[in-house]
Amino acid sequence: MKKNYYFPFLFLYFFLQSFFVFAEDTISAGLKFNSHEVAVENRTGIAIGQNDPFKFSKTIELSFEFQLEPAPFFGNIVRIVFDNKKKLDLSYSPPVIENGQQSLNLVLGKRDNFSIPIFNQAHHYGNWLNASIKLDRDQKKAEFCFMDTTYQLNFSPKSYEGINAVELFFGKQQDGKFVITDVAEMSVRNIKLSLDDKKSYFWPLNELNGTIAQSSQSPKAAYIENPVWAGKYHYLWQQAAQFKADFKPGMIYNEQKHQVEIINQIHEIHYVLPFKQLSDLYYEKPLSIPPSYINAFVNPVNQEKVAYDFRHGELTAFNHNDSSWAEIQASENEMTHWHHNILYDSLRDEYLTFGGYGYFKYKNDFLRFDKTQKAWEKVPFSGDSIPPRYLSAKGYLGNNQYLIFGGMGNYSGRQEMGVNTYQDLYLVDLSARTIKLLWEKEEESQDAFVPAKSIVIDQDKQVFYALTFFPFNQETQLQLRKFNLNSGEEVIVSDKIPFEFKDIRADVDLFYDQDFKKFIAVTRSTIEGMEGIVQIYTLDGPPLAASIYEASLQNEKQTSGFSPLWGGAIAIILLVLLITYFFQKRHRKPEEPAAIITTPSETLKTIPASQEKGAPQQKQESIPETPVAQAFKFDFPRKNAIYLFGGLEVFDREGQDISHKITPKLKQILLLIICYPYNHGRGISSSEMTELVWPTATKSSGKNNRSISIRRLRLILEEIEGVEIVHDKQEWKLELTKEAFCDLNRLLQLKKQLKQEDNRQVQEEIMALTKRGPLPSTLRAEWLDDINNFIVSDTIKLLTDFAVDIDRPNLKLQIADAILHLDDLDEQGLEIKLKTLLSMNKVGQAQSELNRFKKRHQNFFNDEYKLNLEDFQ
């Protein structure tokens, strides 16, 4: 009979093998690695073949692509472990270590090591670099190929002896015989492993989420700890910086230095893209333009940086030698052309402006500044006419030609005649002084948008990108769109950025860094008085269409990277499992009922990925679930829900996970507002919030930071029905209607019910809520740890009290599991579980549980857990 059971599974295996052959590489952005910027436990690692190594008899070749970030830290790139006793490491050394020279280092065993300099012509931050390592065991040869240059590695002949199994570790490795905690700041993709020139395995690393990366050529998976999937950052904007500036500073991008430059009256603030750092540049003397009227522009031909006050018109160029601007005449005139565009005519060496708004009129004039008359004068153009508008975008095509896209205005130019948004594209030839309408679309109310000041043009693909927003709301959102240059066909290619649009009191611009292949969005809004707040966001290019991103998330479910044929494979799997289930069900003995726990997210799976064959053992995932029959069922909602236990997850009214939209600082604020009442019995005051979240800020800056952050958080939470942050009686609170759900709020309600009556269903719902684990622990804040510890300790006490009065073994085991999910080093939870298992005569399972606990205890405390199984009998 047993032989018959093997046949379906053998068929399934070979069936799946054929599907792996047809796997497709849909997204090849790779995996980014958390490195020295985070705590060791939060760094990224990939394990391939761990506990299930690859076998070979003669040769092995590993190839992959990687990107390096400009960071002054040593770090591991990849480790190859042979037979769990020998290791070959490839690591990166920054210039600060290697006397100004970057290098790649290969180390085999204790004695064999080689260092290979990385020269500038071969290495550039932001580019994908090719590398491969090949070993021939019989020939006792090894070679390393980097960027088409091959290096022979003269390892000792003894290094090759007795090796026939291999495991791969990229980045961090903390389990097993070897340990790595120094991780290079890098991204990795397209890992290929070839064995004996016969078998090959390929992991494109094209997933968007999850901790498992599938191979496109075999069932062997790669297991990732703390993944940062780069693919999603081709759709999700990341906030890079936020700081105060003048009321209306100039905003430009220096392509040569790869930095955003915010031009204030007395100094500049630079955001350096490669190093993700802010710096200040103070002028020898203040810029002679009032802070409310600074306009700036980079000459696209010679990269000259200029500033001007439109009211007067005279331009001043920046002197890099002494960090100064030439003095220009001040003006007392009123501004007549807000939100205009500026263009450079290389044929005549002069600057022109187009469009703008002022004195209740929209403009469509091209103006040049007459240096002799010290005044703006109109420049006539032939061809098509552009209707009056402001808030249009410009893009430089080359050959003294520009594109003008979109904007807002009307054909009469008079504000009282109403306002329309334009979706049209014009070619402006400054040499011939001609205008040509390329295409125009009818306005549709659902697509009423205007663009940021600049568009990014990709002539090779005949497309351009515009950062757009709905201009009729103050609290609006920015979103990147891709347009066909010839037809105007468009597609959304990013998520949304919160933006406070106050018309002439706000600005937004879009830039693109060709070397680093990143889009940069820069926004400016006025906060109070004559101060502005600047925010900078980045997006990896090329951007990903919203439809593809959303479909990828839906289909991710641990099948990313595979073709649609996988639907058939999954159907076969389900069929085999269903047959097996019904067969086992017929022979299963009835068990004692306990609670069904239905959860909203993949993070709540009954069997953690770390327990699958070949997966690295991770701290929280090492606790197996107790198999029990069920009675009570708890369907926790996926829509309009906030989950804190096990890590912050936020679901909008459509059931989409929008957690990624909440920055770490906003997550701190949200957790503080939700958790503070748990151990204080009230909401948090403004002063308490400022002291905890911005401890070093002045009273004024703390107030500004709080105001901006609360506003941004409220805007995100508007996507959830029934959730609102309120300020009532000097306290900040989170109010929920019956349409919304928060697991911590529900826990508070259940605790109150327990005080009134002892109810088993309430007890089991508490276990269902808390089985995900503790509150988010990746946000560094001492006060957050204190709140987390209080809630976890209080909940564990509650669960422990449940176990005292319960005589049903299976329910006791479930209580123990819930406790150990909250704290996998809790000795009370261990005691409950071991004593219960021993009472059920499950000595072997009890010993396994104790062994796992001892391992976790040793890894965490670096100290042996002294108690043995006999101590629990």
Image: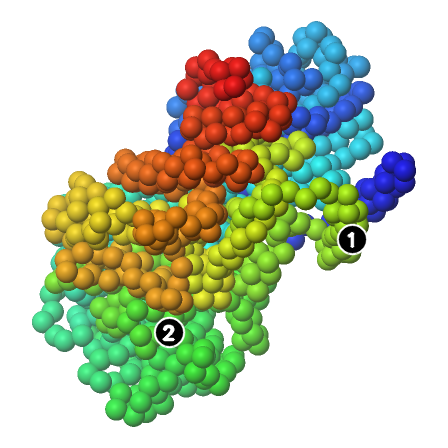
Which of the labelled discs sits on residue 575, or is there none?
1
Amino acid at dot 2: Phe
Which of the labelled discs sits on residue 470, or is there none?
2
Please state which of residues 740 and 144 is positioned toward the viewer in this rendering: 740
Determine whether the residue tagged by mark 2 lies in a helix, strand or loop.
loop
Which residue is painted at 45% across and 66% down in the image? 653
Bin the neighbour count of mark 2 within 10 Å (Cα to Cα): few under 14, some 14-19, many 20 and up. many
Which residue is painted at 53% across and 63% down in the image? 546
Work out whether residue 95 can be spotted.
Answer: no
Image coordinates for residue 797, horizontal then vertical, percent: 36, 36
Quadrant (top left, top right, bottom left, bottom right) of the N terminus: top right
Query: Sequence order check: which comes first, mark 2 or mark 1?
Result: 2
Please state which of residues 98 and 802 is positioned toward the viewer in this rendering: 802
Image coordinates for residue 79, horizontal then vertical, percent: 59, 24
Apparent side of residue 343 relative to residue 62 in the rendered image (left or right): left
Which of the labelled discs sits on residue 733, or is there none?
none
Please state which of residues 301 and 427 is positioned toward the viewer in this rendering: 427
Image coordinates for residue 450, horizontal then vertical, percent: 38, 74
Apparent side of residue 416 relative to residue 388 in the rendered image (left or right): left
Report the Cα–Cα distance between label 2 and label 1.
49 Å
**In the rendered image, the vertical position of residue 609 relative to residue 324, given as above or below:** above
Amino acid at dot 1: Leu
Apparent side of residue 628 relative to residue 330 in the rendered image (left or right): right
Which residue is painted at 56% across and 21% down in the image? 851
Numbered disc total: 2
Depth check, mark 2 against mark 1: the one in front is 1
Display colour scheme = rainbow
Bin the neighbour count of mark 1 within 10 Å (Cα to Cα): few under 14, some 14-19, many 20 and up. few
As drawn, the residue found furthest toward the left would be: 332
Determine whether the residue tagged by mark 1 lies in a helix, strand or loop.
helix
Please state which of residues 862 and 407 is positioned toward the viewer in this rendering: 862
Which residue is painted at 41% across and 79% down in the image? 448
